[in-house]
Image (cartoon, helix red, strand yellow):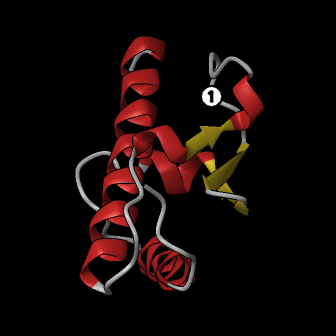
Amino acid sequence: MNALQSYHQFLSGMHKIEMAIIERTRAVGGGIVDPRNFYWHRGRPFLPPPSAIELQIKVGEKKLNAILSREQIADSAERIARPDVAAFVRALATELARQPRSV
């Protein structure tokens, strides 16, 4: 895999993780979270993909922070198959469902 393919796999993994968190949050009755609520890597460039990346989700005044490895993100490019990433998605969704709904 060349560097460009690796980068696209990484971006696809980020997107899959975002969508999984959004879908799971909705499924457990949480307020609406959308891609505008996600802040990856504090706005710094992703090229080359860092070994670990911070994810911050802001909903209203609440913020949730988490760290994912490059491997966890890249392995999620097609689907969320890793048990640790699936558990991460469930935990964040559960916490987001406890937050007041944003408008």
| Residue 94 in view | yes
Callout 1 crowding tier (Cα within 10 Å): few <14, some 14–19, many ≥20: some
Q: Secondary structure at mark 1?
A: loop
Q: Where does residue 63 sit, x and y in percent of width and height?
A: 72, 61
Q: Would residue 15 be found to the left or right of residue 64 on screen?
A: left
Which residue is located at x 44 percent, y 43 percent? 14
**Residue 16 or 58: which is nearer the viewer?**
58
Q: Quadrant of residue 28?
A: bottom left
| Residue 65 in view | no
Figure quadrant of the C terminus: bottom left
Q: Where does residue 95 sit, x and y in percent of width and height?
A: 57, 82
Q: In the current view of this chain or complex, which residue is farthest to the front?
A: 103
Q: Where does residue 77 sit, x and y in percent of width and height?
A: 32, 45
Q: Is residue 50 above or below residue 13?
A: above
Q: Which residue is mark 1?
A: 49
Which residue is located at x 49 percent, y 49 percent? 73
Which residue is located at x 23 percent, y 49 percent? 78
Q: Would residue 96 be found to the left or right of residue 61 on screen?
A: left
Q: Is residue 103 above or below residue 89?
A: above
Q: Would residue 54 be found to the left or right of residue 31 on screen?
A: right
Figure quadrant of the N terminus: top left
**Image label count:** 1
The amino acid pointed to by label 1 is Pro
